[in-house]
Image (spheres, grey):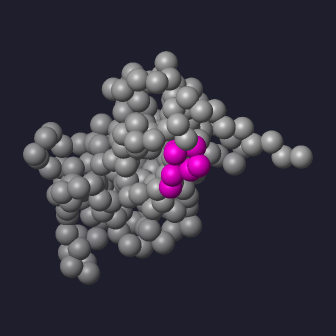
């Protein structure tokens, strides 16, 4: 499994926000599947990084 | 970042709920698997209120001490998919209840994420922010 990380923020109201870093495509969905068991999923979005090829590292440079 | 999710926490794992209650210093009684414990009401015989059979019971004294009760204790009962809170509606209207219940959900989520992370071989680091948010970073190499 590719090295990756997850960030999970839990608010004082007990709501969760999670993001997956360092992995793209369907593998990313599999990795974050277990998070759904924590409660009712109210938002589930793929970001731009989801579709990038595995060996591509995108950088956005604003000038 | 490749995936973003928002989740409303539900109490689905009894061990994580018990760990959260313990962490918050709330004393409770819990039933063995497939059994129940009695949540006694102080309104018995009045307004048709009766004692309830639940999975986890927090008696009135502990509930008052935790700022989550006044008239009665509270409990959790398995409804087939999650542990549902059982409480007198008057206690739910108390000014402290919502905030304390939020903190219980937060600590439950913290315990449950850590339990799941351990099973999956993640290293977990924690940061507590000024606004009360707990930020967990799960790393696997």
Residue most extreme to the top: B141
The part of the image, by quadrant, that contains residue B13 is top left
Magenta span of residues? A45-51
Q: Is residue B62 left or right of residue B138?
A: left
Give the quarter of the figure containing the N terminus of chain A.
Answer: top left
Q: Position of residue B89 (x, y in %)?
A: 38, 73
Q: Position of residue A23 (x, y in %)?
A: 50, 34
Residue at the (40%, 37%) spot, across then down: A27
- Whether residue A23 is visible to the viewer of this picture, yes or no, is yes
The count of marks equals: 0
Residue most extreme to the bottom: B47
Q: Position of residue A35 (x, y in %)?
A: 40, 44
Query: Is B3 a magenta residue?
Result: no
Q: Is residue A6 above or below residue B109?
A: above
Query: Which residue is more in the foreground, B141 or B29?
Result: B141
Query: Which residue is more in the foreground, B96 or B50?
Result: B96
Residue most extreme to the left: B34
Residue at the (30%, 62%) spot, across then down: B86
Residue at the (23%, 74%) spot, across then down: B49
Query: Which residue is more in the foreground, B21 or B81?
Result: B81
Q: Position of residue A56 (x, y in %)?
A: 59, 33
- Whether residue B64 is visible to the viewer of this picture, yes or no, is no
Q: Is residue B41 above or below residue B47?
A: above
Q: Is residue B38 left or right of residue A52?
A: left
Query: Which residue is more in the foreground, B45 or B130?
Result: B130
Q: Is residue A5 above or below residue B31?
A: above
Q: Is residue B17 left or right of residue A51?
A: left
């Amino acid at each position: 499994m590719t090295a990756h990380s997850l960030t999970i923020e839990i608010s004082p109201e007990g709501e969760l926000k999670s993001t997956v870093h360092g992995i793209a495509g369907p593998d990313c969905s599999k990795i974050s599947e277990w998070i759904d068991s924590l409660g009712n999923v109210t938002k589930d979005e793929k970001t731009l990084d989801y579709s990038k090829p595995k060996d591509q590292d995108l950088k956005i440079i604003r000038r | 970042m490749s995936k973003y999710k928002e989740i409303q926490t539900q109490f689905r794992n009894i061990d994580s709920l018990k760990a959260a209650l313990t962490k918050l210093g709330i004393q409770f009684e819990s039933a063995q698997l497939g059994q129940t414990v009695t949540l006694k009401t102080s309104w018995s015989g009045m307004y048709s209120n009766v004692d309830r059979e639940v999975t986890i019971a927090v008696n009135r004294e502990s509930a008052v001490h935790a700022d989550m009760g006044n008239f009665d204790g509270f409990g959790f009962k398995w409804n087939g998919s999650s542990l549902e809170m059982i409480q007198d509606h008057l206690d739910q209207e108390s000014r402290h209840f919502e905030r304390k219940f939020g903190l219980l959900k937060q600590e439950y989520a913290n315990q449950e994420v850590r339990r799941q992370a351990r099973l999956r071989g993640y290293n977990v680091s924690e940061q507590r922010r000024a606004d009360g948010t707990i930020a967990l970073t799960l790393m696997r190499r």
